[in-house]
């Protein structure tokens, strides 16, 4: 599990926040998420960047528009958004047939859980 889940970077305009979400990647799929990059957040620890590079954590970023939200409403909305991102990362598996092959006689079905 990532050390942090939501990081607010800055407020671009009133009610428009630039935010990062860190989601846990299922172990079997981590090789497909490996990266040479580091977090966009300047406060990321070396361990955070290593987790991103190793594919254990995926970083998703974007803008959240919340004009008129109180800080508590913003926090609740960000928690809900993080859960949706985590659920999507956990559910998405385009590699479920990865490596399946045919040798000219028989098919061998493989995949990543």
Image (tube, grey):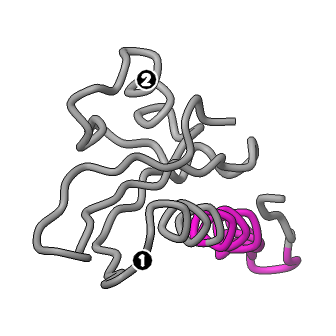
**Quarter of image, res 98:** bottom right
- Along the horizontal axis of the image, is 8 left or right of 80? left
**Could you say where residue 89 lies in the image, as x and y percent from the top left?**
64, 65
State the residue at coordinates (45%, 61%). 71
Q: Residues within 10 Å of mark 2 (few under 14, many from 20)?
A: some
- Along the horizontal axis of the image, is 38 left or right of 25? left
State the residue at coordinates (69%, 36%). 1
State the residue at coordinates (56%, 72%). 77
**Quarter of image, res 65:** bottom left
State the residue at coordinates (43%, 51%). 59
First in residue order: circle 2 vs circle 1: 2
Q: Is residue 103 visible?
A: no
**Quarter of image, res 80:** bottom right
- Along the horizontal axis of the image, is 65 left or right of 75? left
- Along the horizontal axis of the image, is 9 left or right of 107? left
Q: Secondary structure at mark 2?
A: helix
| Residue 50 versus residue 95 in the image, above or below | above
Q: Is residue 39 visible?
A: yes
How many marks can you see? 2
User: Magenta segment, which residues?
Assistant: 81-107
**Could you say where residue 57 lies in the image, as x and y percent from the top left?**
55, 42
| Residue 10 versus residue 87 in the image, above or below | above
**Could you say where residue 51 lies in the image, as x and y percent from the top left?**
50, 29
Which mark's residue is nearer the viewer, 2 or 1? 1
| Residue indicated by mark 2 | 50
| Towards the viewer: 106 or 80 | 80
Q: Residues within 10 Å of mark 1 (few under 14, many from 20)?
A: few
Q: Which mark is residue 22?
A: none
Q: Secondary structure at mark 1?
A: loop
| Residue indicated by mark 1 | 69
């Amino acid at each position: 599990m990532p050390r942090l889940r939501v990081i607010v970077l800055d407020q671009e305009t009133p009610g428009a926040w630039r935010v990062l979400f860190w989601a846990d990647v299922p172990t079997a799929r981590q090789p497909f998420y490996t990266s040479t990059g580091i977090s966009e957040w300047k406060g990321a620890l070396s361990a955070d960047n290593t987790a991103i590079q190793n594919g254990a954590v995926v970083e998703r970023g974007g803008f959240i528009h919340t004009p008129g939200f109180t800080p508590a409403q913003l926090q609740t909305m960000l928690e809900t958004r993080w859960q949706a991102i985590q659920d999507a990362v956990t559910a998405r598996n385009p590699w479920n047939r990865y490596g399946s092959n045919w040798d000219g006689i028989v098919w061998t079905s493989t995949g990543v859980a």
